[in-house]
C-alpha cells in the first residue's frame, strides 16, 4: 500500500449470514467429533438455503454424533427460531450426506512423505509425521493500524457486525434478524489510513419497520 492514494474495502458478516452459518455448522461437527475421537479424519462442509441445510463430506471416526440434532442446535443458537425469519431450527430440512474417508485419500495424507520415504521416524516426532490433509495458498500479516494488529478496514467491519449482533440479542433493536453484513472502505495515503471513505450495512429485518427507520436506528446505535 505505497501508492499515493488508494481505497481498500473489507467486509464482515454476522452469524446468520449463509456463509457464516455454514462455517459454524461445520465447526460444530468438528468440535463434537474431536471431543470423542482426537484422531478422527474430518472433511466436512455445509450448504444452506432458506429452510434447508445440507451437511456433506468424508469423515473417518469412532465418535457417535447425532448430526441432525447438532445442526438444529447450531441454527437455533444463531437465532433462527421462527419461520418469519426465513429459517426455523425446529422445522427446517436437514440432509446428511457423510461417508467414510476415501482409502486413496487416507493413503496419501495419513503419513508425511518424509515418513513414507524412511527419512523420518514417527517415534521421533509423532506430529511431524502426520501428512497434510490439503493444500492451499494464503497471505496476510499483522500491522500497527489498530491495537488488534488487524488492518483498519476489516477491524471496523468486524466491529460493526458485532454491534449488529449485540443489538439484536440484547433486544435494543428487536426487529433485527440474524443475517447481516458490513462493508467499510478506507482511503489510504502513502500506505497509511487517511479517512473512512464509505460504510455500508445490510441487515435482515422483520417487515414491520420502514427503511427510513432502519437507517436512523442503525446510524444511532452502530
Image: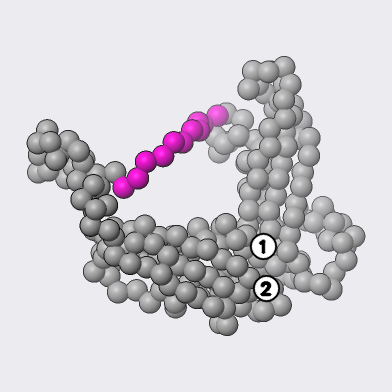
**Residue 108 located left or right of residue 198:** left
Q: Could you tell me which quadrant the N terminus lies in?
A: top right
Give the Cα distance between marks 1 and 2.
Answer: 10 Å
Q: Residue at x 49, y 33 (%)?
A: 139
Quarter of the rendering containing residue 36: bottom left
Bounds of the magenta segment: 133-143
Residue 14 location, x and y as percent?
Answer: 63, 57
- Give whichever of discs 1 and 2 has the lower sequence position: 2
Q: Neighbour class for label 2 at 10 Å: few (<14), some, many (≥20)?
A: some
* Residue 31 position in % (x across, y down): 37, 62
Q: Tell me: residue 210, above or below residue 222.
A: below
x and y percentages locating residue 137 in the rendered image: 44, 36
Question: Circle 2 sits in a helix, a strand or a loop, which is it?
Answer: loop
Closer-to-camera residue (59/122) = 59
Residue annotated with mark 2: 86
Any part of residue 221 in sight? yes
Judged from this view, the residue extending furthest toward the front is: 104
Under tag 1, what secondary structure?
Answer: strand
Give the quadrant of residue 15. bottom right
**Which residue corresponds to the image point at 20% horizontal and 38% vertical from the top-left?**
113
41 is higher (above) or lower (below) than 127: below
Tell me the residue that label 1 is attached to: 179
In the image, is 60 to the left or to the right of 212?
Answer: left
Residue at the bottom extreme of this rendering? 91
Magenta span dominant secondary structure: loop
Between 23 and 151, the one nearer to me in the picture: 23
The magenta stretch spans residue 93: no
Q: Does the residue at mark 1 contact the one at mark 2 (Cβ under 8 Å)?
A: yes
Identity of the residue drawn at 78% across and 35% down:
197
Q: Can residue 166 be seen in this view?
A: no
- As rendered, which of 106 and 148 lies closer to the eye? 106
Amino acid at each position: 500500500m505505497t501508492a499515493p492514494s488508494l481505497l481498500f474495502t473489507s467486509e464482515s458478516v454476522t452469524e446468520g449470514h449463509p456463509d457464516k452459518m455454514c462455517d459454524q455448522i461445520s465447526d460444530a461437527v468438528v468440535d463434537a467429533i474431536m471431543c470423542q475421537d482426537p484422531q478422527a479424519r474430518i472433511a466436512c462442509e455445509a450448504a444452506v438455503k432458506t429452510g434447508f441445510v445440507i451437511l456433506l463430506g468424508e469423515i473417518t471416526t469412532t465418535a457417535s454424533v447425532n448430526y441432525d440434532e447438532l445442526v438444529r442446535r447450531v441454527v437455533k443458537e444463531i437465532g433462527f427460531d421462527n419461520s418469519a425469519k426465513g429459517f426455523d431450527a425446529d422445522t427446517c430440512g436437514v440432509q446428511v450426506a457423510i461417508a467414510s474417508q476415501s482409502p486413496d485419500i487416507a493413503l496419501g495424507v495419513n503419513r508425511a512423505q518424509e515418513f513414507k520415504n524412511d527419512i523420518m521416524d514417527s517415534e521421533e516426532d509423532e506430529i511431524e509425521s502426520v501428512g497434510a490433509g490439503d493444500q492451499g495458498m494464503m497471505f496476510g500479516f499483522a500491522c500497527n493500524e489498530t491495537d488488534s494488529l488487524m488492518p483498519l478496514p476489516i477491524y471496523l467491519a468486524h466491529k460493526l457486525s458485532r454491534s449488529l449482533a449485540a443489538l439484536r440479542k440484547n433486544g435494543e433493536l428487536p426487529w433485527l434478524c440474524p443475517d447481516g453484513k458490513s462493508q467499510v472502505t478506507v482511503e489510504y495515503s502513502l500506505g497509511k489510513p487517511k479517512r473512512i471513505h464509505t460504510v455500508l450495512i445490510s441487515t435482515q429485518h422483520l417487515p414491520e419497520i420502514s427503511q427510513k427507520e432502519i437507517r436512523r436506528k442503525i446510524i444511532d446505535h452502530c
